Image (cartoon, rainbow, N blue to C red):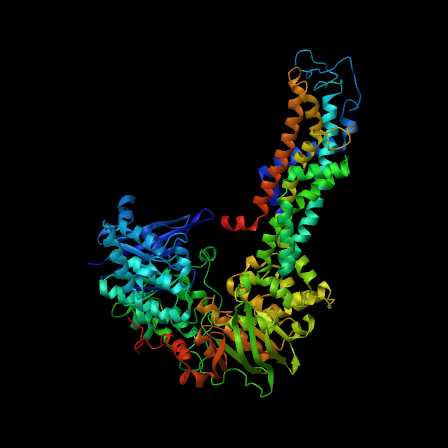
């Protein structure tokens, strides 16, 4: 018997008077005690399944066909009261953002208690015992103390553990985990995933694990479904799907992810996932416009599900050709760096004054004793968990903060004392969130040439437009984007604009703060390829701040590892990653799931 | 911005408010042309006449006369002049002082922010009506003094509300980006911060106009507003109060006029808030 069974499930969205399919003919069986991974980039429709089960589809969305049954009960046609009785008890959810999922004005204990009342545990002492037991099972030490705390007194990881404990407290038969690690620090991902897997195994629960991380899914799930533009393009046992991907999209996605073991070029899938509006114009296979092996047939008809192995299905006419998609091996990490140091940072420190009531002036060191150098044309990575002081270093370098101590020399000149205009010619920053980094009221041409507007410049409108078009072509955007507003661009396009603006004054050093962490894998590959190309064309050095070690390994030649405000380890990437000295570096490295799905990972299910 | 204008003109709230404000404003500007009588002209043989449609009304005085036989309609029309002048100049004056301080305070932060913030706190701890009365006693009566008093009392409202918005905008990365690109503080404030706070600023001005109309009426009512020979709605209410049993019309008409003007400005402010606030647009998307 299967816990959850979907047959030809379809979800449609109303758009301009017509219904556009958001999910098309999705079928799967989830057996008891199994983990099913739904993998895909944003917009693939993977979150819709969880919403369809809870009947919480966004306005304008509706289930248009198919069946969805939970233990042979039809979820779509059951009475709302009956469904409510199942939700939160037999079917539990683990949310994406733990801090917003908990009520900030209630203690953890009260929220847990309320939940257990719903689960029909009537005696107060029994409920308390159950809560303590569940929190202990979720590896929260001092469980009874955690119950007296408010959500803001716990870290994000602890809140997620509480929510996982709550989800499993009702002995559910099905748990839906929608990107349960996305909002958490990278070093916590494996532990949280491991926790879900452990709890699942102990209780024999079936789990739907929604994620964008193909590698993670391969290690955690029994089966995976790869989604693209609303269609399940590949479906099969997790290890088999990753070992022999037979849909071109799965293969491209795998190759777009930087490798931790070998140096190879990233596979750059052109363009982006079609929006709902664009979907209506694509006939045949939805992936065909971006597919490297697409033929005429693919554009004419929707491909059928082709069986390629045991329980392994791929929706493609050309499953044979998929194997031929490869990327070139790249031997050098981009251009070779010059020997002469461009940037020299010595003994840098930044202290923030603490509370200053009644003489208690403890200051907190966000950054201390930091020394490093960057050579011309060199890409150096700065890694570490959140709160380790990475962003503070970025702000100190570009001059958004003044250091409490230390020296920053660029080309032998002191950068801290230099004036705004000189500094802006030398160092520029690319911001993490392109949404907030672009003024929504300026057009693209005005944004990318903003440096020419600053005091001391006098560029005519024509000069600015010409420069804007040059910059747009450099970052690979068509010239007619110049007259658009940021709101009319996608996330990847906005990040290109963000990069173009920083490059306008041809800086020698670029500081990039987590610039690909908000992007989908295929878009991330595009941006990484763009950065490598721009370096060889324009020549600049970069401090690349990231938490993603595989990205860092692909792009940079040296790495600085930060931990609690200090650089604990630095050196050439290969050397540091293959023989980490500091325990924190080792912890960071072990949080990356290995590429080979057959190899063991301490956090695997 | 043209987009915002066309969106505003499609909002029924804004359209209705604009029609009302244009009527009142038109009367104020064209007062000598549209008013049937001189507002100061006394006609002692026909005092306290009801409106022309009521029994005993005189068609020469469409809305009747007051206790000195002056034409109520003409006085209302000339009173609109006083009210509109005060509304426009007082709210713009308060906006300039308040928004300059708010932008400086929110953008630079630190000691400046602390100082301006405390000044606003202290200023706002005086009851506003009492403060304006004290100011009027000190300054003396007159249209310019009323405007000055309202500016001095109400700049704090702009300062406090706008500062919060400036704080939010200043923390956006694009403001940091502008600074990194070599923009001076002045350039950053004018080109990056102000365009983002402008919708709120415009909304606050239209709400402040409503407040200015009320404050002017209160000051005139207690005789500390404009000079006595200048018609004002508050003054008309004060005069009519004594004869409220003989002629309730004299009391009701200026009250109704004040109500209409205030409602129009509030409606405009609410409409602008709904159409210009980008955050509300995001929800609809």
Spot occupied by residue A495 in the image (x, y as percentages of width and height): 54, 66
Residue found at the far bottom of this picture: A339
Spot occupied by residue A124 in the image (x, y as percentages of width and height): 25, 51
Q: How many marks?
A: 0
Relative vertical location of residue B111 with respect to residue A428 in this rendering, above or below = above
Residue under the point 60% across and 87% down? A340
Image position of B210 (left or right of A231): right
Q: Nearer the viewer, residue A529 or B15?
A: B15
Whether residue A313 appears in this view of the structure is no
Q: Nearer the viewer, residue A160 or A52?
A: A160
Residue found at the far front of this picture: A358
Q: Nearer the viewer, residue B265 or A73?
A: B265
Q: Nearer the viewer, residue A599 or A160?
A: A160
Spot occupied by residue A574 in the image (x, y as percentages of width and height): 44, 84
Image-quadrant location for residue A21: bottom left
Residue under the point 44% across and 59% down? A282
Image-quadrant location for residue A9: bottom left
Image position of B57 (left or right of A325): right
Residue found at the far top of this picture: B56
Relative vertical location of residue A274 with respect to residue B255 in this rendering, above or below = below
Spot occupied by residue B86 in the image (x, y as percentages of width and height): 72, 37
Whether residue A58 appears in this view of the structure is yes
């Amino acid at each position: 018997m299967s816990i959850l069974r979907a047959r030809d499930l379809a979800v449609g969205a109303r758009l301009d008077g017509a219904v556009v399919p958001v999910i098309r003919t999705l079928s799967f069986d989830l057996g008891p005690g199994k983990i099913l991974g739904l993998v895909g980039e944003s917009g693939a429709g993977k979150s819709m399944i969880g919403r369809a089960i809870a009947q919480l589809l966004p306005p304008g969305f509706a289930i248009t066909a198919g069946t969805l049954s939970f233990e042979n009960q039809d979820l779509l046609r059951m009475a709302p009261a009956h469904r409510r009785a199942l939700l939160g008890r037999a079917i539990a959810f683990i949310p994406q953002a733990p801090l917003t999922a908990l009520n900030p004005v209630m203690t953890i204990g009260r929220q847990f208690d309320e939940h257990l009342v719903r689960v029909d545990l009537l005696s107060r002492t029994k409920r308390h015992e159950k809560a303590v037991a569940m929190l202990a099972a979720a590896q929260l030490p001092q469980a009874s103390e955690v119950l007296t705390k408010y959500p803001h007194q716990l870290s994000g990881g602890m809140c997620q553990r509480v929510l996982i404990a709550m989800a499993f407290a009702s002995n559910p038969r099905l748990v839906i985990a929608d990107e349960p690690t996305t909002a958490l620090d990278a070093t916590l991902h494996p532990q949280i995933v491991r926790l879900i897997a452990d709890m699942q195994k102990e209780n024999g629960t079936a789990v739907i694990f929604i994620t964008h991380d193909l590698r993670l899914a391969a290690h955690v799930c029994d089966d995976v479904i790869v989604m693209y533009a609303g269609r399940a393009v590949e479906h099969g046992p997790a290890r088999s799907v990753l070992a022999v991907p037979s849909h071109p999209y799965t293969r491209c996605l795998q190759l777009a992810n930087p490798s931790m073991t070998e140096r190879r070029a990233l596979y750059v899938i052109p363009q982006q996932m079609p929006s709902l509006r664009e979907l209506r114009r694509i006939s045949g296979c939805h992936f065909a416009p971006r597919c490297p092996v697409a033929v005429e047939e693919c554009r004419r008809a929707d491909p059928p599900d082709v069986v390629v192995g045991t329980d392994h299905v791929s929706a493609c006419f050309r499953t044979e050709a998929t194997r031929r998609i490869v990327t070139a091996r790249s031997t050098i990490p981009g251009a070779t760096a010059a020997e002469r140091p461009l940037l020299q940072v010595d003994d840098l420190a930044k202290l923030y004054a603490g509370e200053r009531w009644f003489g208690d002036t403890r200051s907190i060191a966000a950054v201390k004793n930091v020394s490093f150098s960057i050579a011309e044309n060199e890409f150096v990575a700065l890694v570490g968990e959140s709160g380790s002081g990475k962003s503070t270093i970025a702000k100190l370098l570009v001059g958004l903060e003044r250091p409490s101590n230390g020296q920053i020399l660029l080309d032998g000149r002191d950068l801290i004392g230099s004036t705004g205009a000189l500094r802006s010619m030398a160092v520029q920053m690319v911001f993490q969130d392109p949404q907030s980094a672009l003024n929504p009221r300026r057009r693209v041409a005005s944004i990318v040439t903003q440096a020419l507007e600053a005091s001391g410049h006098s560029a005519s409108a024509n000069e600015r437009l010409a420069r804007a078009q040059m910059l747009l072509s450099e970052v690979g955007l068509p010239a007619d984007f110049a007259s658009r507003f940021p709101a009319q661009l996608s996330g990847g396009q906005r990040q290109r604009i963000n990069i173009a603006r920083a490059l306008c004054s041809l800086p020698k050093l670029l500081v990039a703060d987590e610039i690909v962490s908000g992007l989908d894998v295929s878009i991330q590959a595009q941006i990484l390829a763009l950065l490598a190309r721009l370096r060889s064309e324009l020549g600049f050095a970069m401090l690349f701040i990231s938490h993603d070690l595989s990205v860092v390994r692909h792009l940079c030649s040296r790495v600085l590892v930060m931990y609690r405000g200090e650089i604990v380890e630095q050196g050439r990437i290969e050397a540091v990653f293959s023989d980490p000295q500091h325990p924190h570096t080792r912890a960071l490295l072990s949080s990356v799931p290995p590429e080979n799905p057959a190899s063991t990972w301490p956090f695997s299910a | 911005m043209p987009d915002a204008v066309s969106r505003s003109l499609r909002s029924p709230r804004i359209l209705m408010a604009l029609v009302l404000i244009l009527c009142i404003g038109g009367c104020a500007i064209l007062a000598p042309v549209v008013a049937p009588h001189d507002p100061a002209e006394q006609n002692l043989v026909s005092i306290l006449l009801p409106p022309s449609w009521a029994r005993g009304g005189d068609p020469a005085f469409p809305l009747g006369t007051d206790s000195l036989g002056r034409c109520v309609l003409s006085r209302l029309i000339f009173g609109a002049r006083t009210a509109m002048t005060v509304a426009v100049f007082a709210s713009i004056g308060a906006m300039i002082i308040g928004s300059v301080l708010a932008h400086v305070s929110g953008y630079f932060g630190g000691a400046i922010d602390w100082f301006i913030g405390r000044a606003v706190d202290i200023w706002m701890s005086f009851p506003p009506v009492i403060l304006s009365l004290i100011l009027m006693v000190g300054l003396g009566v007159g249209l310019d003094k009323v405007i000055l008093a309202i500016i001095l009392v109400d700049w704090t409202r702009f300062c406090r509300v706008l500062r919060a918005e400036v704080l939010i905008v200043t923390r956006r990365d694009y403001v940091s980006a502008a600074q990194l690109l070599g923009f001076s503080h002045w350039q950053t404030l004018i080109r990056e911060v102000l365009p983002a706070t402008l919708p709120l600023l415009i909304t606050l001005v239209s709400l402040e106009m409503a407040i200015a109309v009320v404050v002017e009426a209160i000051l005139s009512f207690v005789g500390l507003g404009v000079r006595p020979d200048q018609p004002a709605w508050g003054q008309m209410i004060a005069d009519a109060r004594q004869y409220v049993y003989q002629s309730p019309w004299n009391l009701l008409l200026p009250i109704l006029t004040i109500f209409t003007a205030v409602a129009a400005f509030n409606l405009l402010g609410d409409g602008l808030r709904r159409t210009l606030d980008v955050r509300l647009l995001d929800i609809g998307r």
